Amino acid sequence: MDVVTIGETMVLFTPKSSPLMRYAETYSRQFGGAETNFAIGLTRLGHQAGWISKVGNDEFGKSMLSFIRGEGVNVSQVEFDPTAPTGMYFKEVRSGNQVRVQYYRKGSAASQLQPSDLNEEYIAGAKYLHVTGITPALSESCYQTILRAISIAKENDVKVIFDPNLRRKLWSEDHSRKVLLEIAALSDIILPGLDEGTFLFNEEDPIKLGELFLKQGASLVVLKIGAKGAYYFTEEEYQLIPGFPVTNVVDPVGAGDGFAAGLISGLLEGLPLDQAVAKGNGVGAMVTMVPGDFEGLPDSEELKAFMEFTSSEDV
Ligand code: ATP
């Protein structure tokens, strides 16, 4: 595997007959989870990605697994849990930039993940381990599982990518800040959004935030700033790589996961940092133009065409 990721994917219902859940009688059924959005992003760009998780031994779990397998993600480390259901959530897009989410995930199969579920060889064989700040919020055993996965990665020279993915509905501010900083300090690459950086360090200036994240010990920090693009920071330099203009944002959810897939794809291909971040910006922008968390993820040809077309438009 190029990259292995751990986390929960849920059944996602989106209102159909009315955009508002209060009035909708019919819903469309998709799947959504930050870690599999990222893994699918990588497979579409031609890389090998594996997913570690648990799903319920129910119809939702079965169709989800078939679907994600169908996207080319390795699911050999996903178990059916007969004791707990597959989690679900509802997403209401009120306007391009206003999204409301309602979870039904407490006690879900994925929240039962245990450190002993991890297959050491599987993680040790990857180039990167990807974790988010969502999984440790699901349960104490999920938190312990993430710490164990990171220590397996470190023992085997597998680089750790951390996307904080703050989910305020899942845990308290103090608890989330403590755990997210703990994981940041164990990571090689950190991918925060500007709002997450501000939450963690009480600082709004992106340059100061970059320095604060680097001080945690990472060798690369990439700070996402929405439509404006992203800054990268290393010990030697920092640079703002501008985003691609999008006039029709339909659904911004998943842009950060797509960005991570584009960036890591660039790093796997050995691109210089500015080009890898630009690739992340390209994927992130494309995700916002399509409804759904991962549907807008491009393959390499689509991404190349979008990036060339958008750049030539600018000239
Ligand atoms: P998410 O909502 O998925 O958690 P995030 O907060 O992690 O996202 P954002 O900064 O919103 O991250 O978006 C990630 C990247 O996607 C940006 O750095 C940018 O490259 C791209 N992107 C996001 N929104 C837009 C937009 N409106 N126009 C162009 N590019 C965008």
Image (cartoon, rainbow, N blue to C red):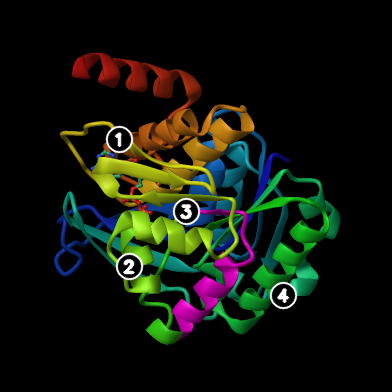
Residue denoted by label 3: 191
Nearer the observer: mark 4 or 3; the answer is: 3
Image: 10 above or below 167: above
Residue furthest front in the image: 236
The amino acid type found where label 3 is placed reads: Leu
The amino acid type found where label 2 is placed reads: Thr
For label 1, the SS is strand
Q: Where residue 300 appears, x then y in whole percent? A: 49, 23
Q: Of the two numbered discs 4 and 2 on the same chain, state the one appearing first in sequence.
A: 4
Q: Of the two numbered discs 1 and 2 on the same chain, state the one appearing first in sequence.
A: 2
Q: CA distance from mark 4 to mark 2?
A: 31 Å
Residue denoted by label 1: 242
Q: CA distance from mark 3 to mark 1?
A: 16 Å
Which residue lies at the image location 75% right of the left edge and 73% below the top edge?
115
Q: Of the two numbered discs 4 and 3 on the same chain, state the one appearing first in sequence.
A: 4
Q: Of the two numbered discs 3 and 1 on the same chain, state the one appearing first in sequence.
A: 3
The amino acid type found where label 4 is placed reads: Gln
Mark 3: is the Cβ under 8 angstroms from ligand 1? yes
Which residue lies at the image location 77% right of the left edge and 54% below the top edge?
123
Image: 28 above or below 105: above
Q: Where residue 128 appears, x then y in whole percent? A: 68, 47
Residue denoted by label 2: 198
Q: CA distance from mark 3 to mark 2?
A: 13 Å
